[in-house]
Image (tube, grey):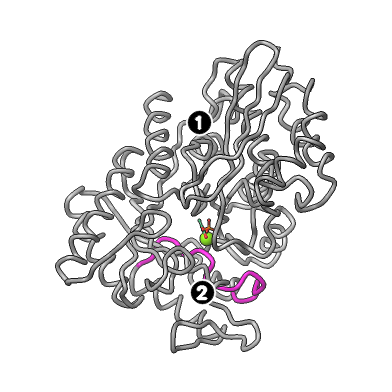
Amino acid sequence: MTRITSVSLRRILESRGNPTVEADVLTESGGFGRAAAPSGASTGEFEAIELPPTEAIASAREHAIPRLEGLFAGDQRSVDGALRAADGTEDFSAIGANSAVAISMAAAKAAADVLGAPLYQHLGGAFRGDNFPTPLGNVIGGGEHAKEATHIQEFLAAPVGAPSVAEAVFANATVHGTVADILDERGVPAAKGDEGAWAPPISDAEAFEVVEEAVERVEDEVGFEVRFGLDVAAAELYDADEEVYVYGDETKSADEQVEYIAELVDEYDLAYVEDPFDENDYEAFTALTERVGDRTLVCGDDLFVTNVKRLQKGIDMDAANSILIKPNQIGTLSDTFDAVELAHRNEMECAISHRSGETEDTTIAHLAVATDAAFIKTGSVGGERTAKLNELIRIADDAV
Ligand SMILES: C=C(OP(=O)(O)O)C(=O)O
Ligand SMILES: [Mg+2]
């Protein structure tokens, strides 16, 4: 039986050294699931609320856990419905999206454990298919993830021609290493940012040169197509009072930003552009998608925050052709699956994503396979990133 007998919550460390929430779910028959909430730095204005972990844990213990005991762990909709009922708000501001997502994911893992099935199979079903996501690997980063580095938050290797998950994962790590070589050749010192990407003190223009060269070298080495993409995280660059994007001493209006990004797509043959505009500017997303949506993925992260209402508005406006999916932006696996399903029904691609503050939790690797997502964004090196990438390799090994 998969009835939940206990849920325990604790504070553990995430990769930036801050506390986050971990949940353990136990079932009657001994099924066990453990999951931890990640934590963002460049968070979207419309995300579900992450409470300070001590507060989130105390509130979930008081309001949510009594409702969860006795439910079937495998009945994810009931578990997530109980979390929503316990919270009583739209944005999980009562028990915290961090408590909610940790419990939701831990319940799924406990159910998989009872079934003796891997999580991706429990969530995706027996007829899931045999597609695997392409990993987007952060190789140079700045913005909110590293001071004194690029304005654009993430330069992402995209090994779109890789014949297997493992080759794609290794290609991204090789791009990361090659970027280090090129920076070294240029005499540029480089520390690492929050997600393990290099955070060199160079301009965005120089970062484009470096990543382009790295991708070309690696493409020659591996013999399949490797492109790159961006997470501009433009909401962090946007000055709402002046209505401009601020790149150091330079500013760009929304129209100029559309022009700039469209030019970058063509100049660098970008495979992917995430959050090129502020999260309130659906119109600019629509303008860019109309211009370059036939040759690149225009992806909404802070724009959609894994929220079906915001996604539906984007669909109605043709604002993007892909969505970033982060379970902790919305708080439960059920809500996460709803967003993926809505996107897929509307022929949008999904990229399942980590947060900049991560743990060794590997749930998103399973989620990406279970949902048949085209992409997974989870860094390219670093323990909390390789935990997911290595799990993806294991899943691919297991599934064939
Ligand atoms: C992973 C990201 O960063 P954060 O977790 O800081 O929001 C992102 O913006 O896509
Ligand atoms: Mg983003």
For image coordinates 67% across by 35% down, the residue present is 104
Identify the main secondary structure in magenta.
loop
Image mark for residue 263: none
Q: Is residue 325 above or below residue 363?
A: below
Residue at the disc numbered 2: 291
Helix, strand or loop at mark 1:
loop
Specify the farthest residue to the left. Answer: 185
Q: Nearer the viewer, residue 191 or 119?
A: 191
For image coordinates 64% across by 59% down, the residue present is 304
Q: Position of residue 186 (x, y in %)?
A: 17, 72
79 lies left or right of 272: right
Label 1: how many residues lie within 10 Å, few (<14), some (14-19) or many (20+)? Answer: few
| The residue stretch that appears in magenta | 269-284
Image mark for residue 129: 1
277 in magenta: yes
In which quarter of the view is residue 64 placed? top right
For image coordinates 22% across by 71% down, the residue present is 188
Q: Position of residue 303 (x, y in %)?
A: 63, 64
Q: Nearer the viewer, residue 278 or 146?
A: 146
274 in magenta: yes
In which quarter of the view is residue 141 placed? bottom left
For image coordinates 58% across by 50% down, the residue present is 325
Q: Is residue 223 above or below residue 66?
A: below
Q: Nearer the viewer, residue 82 or 194?
A: 194
